[in-house]
Amino acid sequence: MADLILTPNIEKADDFYAELLAAHDHMAKVDSDALNARLVLVLANHIGDNAVLAQAIDAARLKTT
């Protein structure tokens, strides 16, 4: 089993963030939410490891409480 990487691991993270924000430009909230949901599913499929995905859910949950 792999472990979830929680340390910075994205090359040119600011560029990625700008691209992500641009993808949401001029979208209604419902469409923006749908884009986020599709993105989560695409990335979850890419990861493909249920244990890592469970770690990610736990880490995200801890950030919102």
Image (spheres, rainbow, N blue to C red):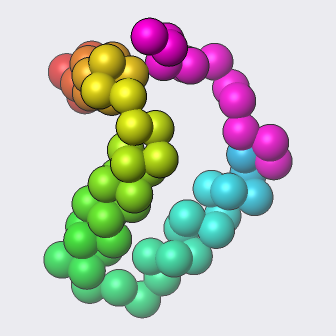
Instruction: Tell how many labels.
Output: 0
Query: Which residue is rendered at x = 68% and y = 26% of the image?
Result: 8
Query: Which residue is rendered at x = 25% and y = 80% of the image?
Result: 31
Q: Quadrant of residue 30?
A: bottom left
Asked if residue 56 lies in the magenta stretch, the reply is no
Q: Nearer the viewer, residue 6 or 63?
A: 6
When the figure is inspected, residue 35 is found, relative to residue 63, above or below; the finding is: below
Query: Which residue is rendered at x = 37% and y = 44% of the image?
Result: 44
- Please provide percent x and percent y for residue 21: 54, 67
Q: Quadrant of residue 17?
A: bottom right
Q: Quadrant of residue 16?
A: bottom right
- Please provide percent x and percent y for residue 53: 33, 28
Q: Is residue 63 visible to us here?
A: no
- Please provide percent x and percent y for residue 47: 46, 38
When the figure is inspected, residue 32 is found, relative to residue 12, above or below; the finding is: below
When the figure is inspected, residue 48 is found, relative to residue 16, above or below; the finding is: above
Q: Quadrant of the N terminus?
A: top left
In the picture, measured across the screen, residue 63 lies left or right of residue 30, that is right
Query: Which residue is rendered at x = 55% and y = 64% of the image?
Result: 20
- Secondary structure mostly seen in the magenta stretch: loop
In the picture, measured across the screen, residue 22 lies left or right of residue 31, that is right
Q: In this view, which residue lies farthest toward the bottom?
A: 26
Asked if residue 7 lies in the magenta stretch, the reply is yes
Q: In this view, which residue lies farthest toward the right?
A: 12
Q: Nearer the viewer, residue 17 or 37?
A: 37
- Please provide percent x and percent y for residue 4: 48, 18
Q: Is residue 53 visible to us here?
A: yes
Q: Quadrant of the C terminus?
A: top left
In the picture, measured across the screen, residue 20 lies left or right of residue 46, that is right
The residues colored magenta run 1-12
